[in-house]
Image (cartoon, coloured by chain):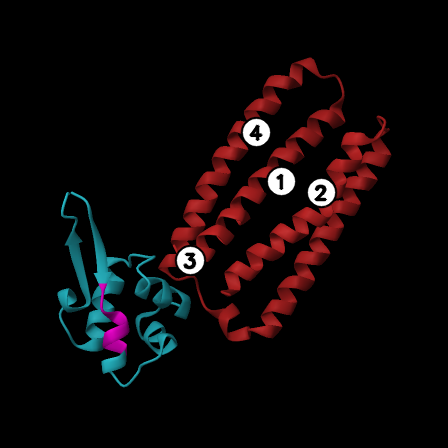
Amino acid sequence: MPYREKIAWLSLIAMAVTFGPYFVVVGTAEPMGMLPYLRLFGIAALAQMLILGFGHLYFRWMSPEEARLPMDERDRAIMFRSITNAYYVLIVGMILVGCVMPFNSSGWSIINAAIFMIVAAEVVHYGLVVVCYRRHT
Amino acid sequence: MDGSLSNRVRTLRFLNGEMTQSELGQRIGVTRQTIAAIEAGKYSPSLEAAFRIAQVFNVALEDVFQWKTDANG
């Protein structure tokens, strides 16, 4: 498996195990105050950073030569395709958040909706990287 | 006009002392996985990479890559 595909899998898993539970909690729990939301978000963000940090270190340690290689033309083509698609998801998501914003009085609902769209765009980005590497394209 | 790109990279590697995908990749500046994708016909290399591959095997570009037009195209 190419090094960059491993990193994409790592990013997807980190996103799933941190922001997955975060959105389950904020989506199902009773409305909370500012501090509990901040604490939850902080825990999710910190956990994601730790998983990504240790994951990167582990993969660099396992395959140092591959990690040092610069992106080649196929890597760049895959990156371009995935970022372009993720960008559209992000833009549509932000427009949707902007549309519902005037009808929502809770600041954290809007912030969580925006975070959800950012996470969705990242999932599309890394998901497409994995799909492209799997399909060899 | 419909068609597809085919290549003889695998054959040329064999004819050049069973050159590995990694070695070919290093010589043209791409990863082993990219060479594998090119050989499998899953990725069409840039013109520059195609010329580099031909140069490594010391053959003309059309001896490495061929464009096949579909019969109904």
Q: Amino acid at mark 3?
A: Asp
Give the structural element (helix, strand or loop) at label 2: helix
Crowd band around label 4 with a 10 angstrom C-alpha radius: few (<14), some (14–19), many (20+): many
Give the CA separation, mark 4 to mark 1.
10 Å
- Seen in the image, is A80 located left or right of residue B41? right
Give the CA separation, mark 1 to mark 3.
22 Å
**Based on the displayed image, in which of its 4 quarters is residue A136 positioned?**
bottom left
The quarter in which the N terminus of chain B is drawn is top left
Compared with A122, B67 (above or below) is: below
Colour assigned to chain A in the rendering is: red
Q: Position of residue A5 (x, y in %)?
A: 52, 59
Q: Earlier in the sequence, mark 2 or mark 3?
A: 2
Residue A20's disc is 2
The magenta span reads: B7-13
In the picture of the structure, the residue carrying the numbered disc 1 is A119
User: Which residue is pictured at 31% across the width and 66% down the height?
Assistant: B39
| Most common SS among magenta residues | helix
> Please, which chain is the residue tagged with disc 4 on?
A
